[in-house]
Image (cartoon, rainbow, N blue to C red):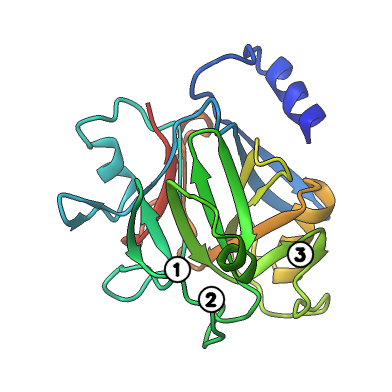
Amino acid sequence: MRLVHAFLLLWFGLPASAASEVLCENITYLGKSYTACTVDPARDNLRLFHKNSGQILGSFRAIENLPDVTALPFAMNAGMYHADRTPVGLYIENGVEEMRVIPNAGPGNFGLLPNGVLCLNDDSAQVYETMDYIETAPACRDATQSGPMLVIDGDLHPRFLPDSTSRFLRNGVGTTAAGDSAVFVISNDVVSFHEFGSFFRDYLQLPNALYFDGKVSRLHAPALGRSDFGFQLGPMVGVVE
């Protein structure tokens, strides 16, 4: 993954020390199209977004309009939410816990255990399986829980079926073992969980990856001329300047 990252830096002519330069590219893998955005959490200001002054933001444009934001190089929906757009599971933003962690199985994709947590700090991004998160209790400046896990310590989620006919546009995130790189991915074609998880494990070679959502999956990547719209969103993740 480090070699791929270094190659992309050279390809785009970007110095490794560039500030808030998210690398987004379209990739075709096994006949399916994906867009992958690689973020360096030590360089890029990677944050979660849900509310401002008590009001749910709901869109990428609302993040862009925040008074302390001058640019939004990347953003994506980041975790499942209820009809009122409150988070289904754990949600922490700037050290404040809005919703507690949910350890038990339940209905829908979120409850298809094992699920997981994306934990962000000023210099790291890590995906944890939920029970591992509870046991190790890492300090997270921002955190969002979603599910299911796509890749768990190098293995696909045990419930994923190679011949599944359930296919949607899907998005999620994978992180390196060191937590020094996070790759956010959205499928541009409908894919199964098995296909989506395999992209993280086999193509990106990331040891842990977490599913964010399907159907409502959205990406903001202005470098690619893309900013999806549609459903009002709950939790979002983005790099801001």
Q: CA distance from mark 2 to mark 3?
A: 18 Å
Nearest-to-viewer mark from 2 and 3: 2
Q: Amino acid at mark 3?
A: Glu
The residue carrying mark 2 is 110
Q: Residues within 10 Å of mark 1 (few under 14, many from 20)?
A: many
Residues at circles 2 and 1 in contact by the CB criterion of under 8 Å: yes
Q: Residues within 10 Å of mark 3 (few under 14, many from 20)?
A: many
Viewer-proximal residue, 177 or 238? Answer: 177
Q: Is residue 197 above or below residue 176?
A: below
Q: Which residue is depicted at the point 75% across and 80% down?
A: 159
The image shows residue 235 at horizontal and vertical percentages of: 38, 57
Residues at circles 1 and 3 in contact by the CB criterion of under 8 Å: no
Q: Which residue is depicted at the point 25% across and 44% down?
A: 62
The residue carrying mark 3 is 195
Quadrant of the rendering where the C terminus is positioned:
top left
Left/right placement of residue 25 relative to residue 42 reads: right
The image shows residue 217 at horizontal and vertical percentages of: 49, 59
**Quick check: can you spot residue 145?**
yes
Per the image, label 3 sits on a secondary structure element best described as: helix
Q: Amino acid at mark 1?
A: Met
Q: CA distance from mark 2 to mark 1?
A: 7 Å
Viewer-proximal residue, 221 or 57? Answer: 57
The residue carrying mark 1 is 80
Q: Amino acid at mark 2?
A: Phe
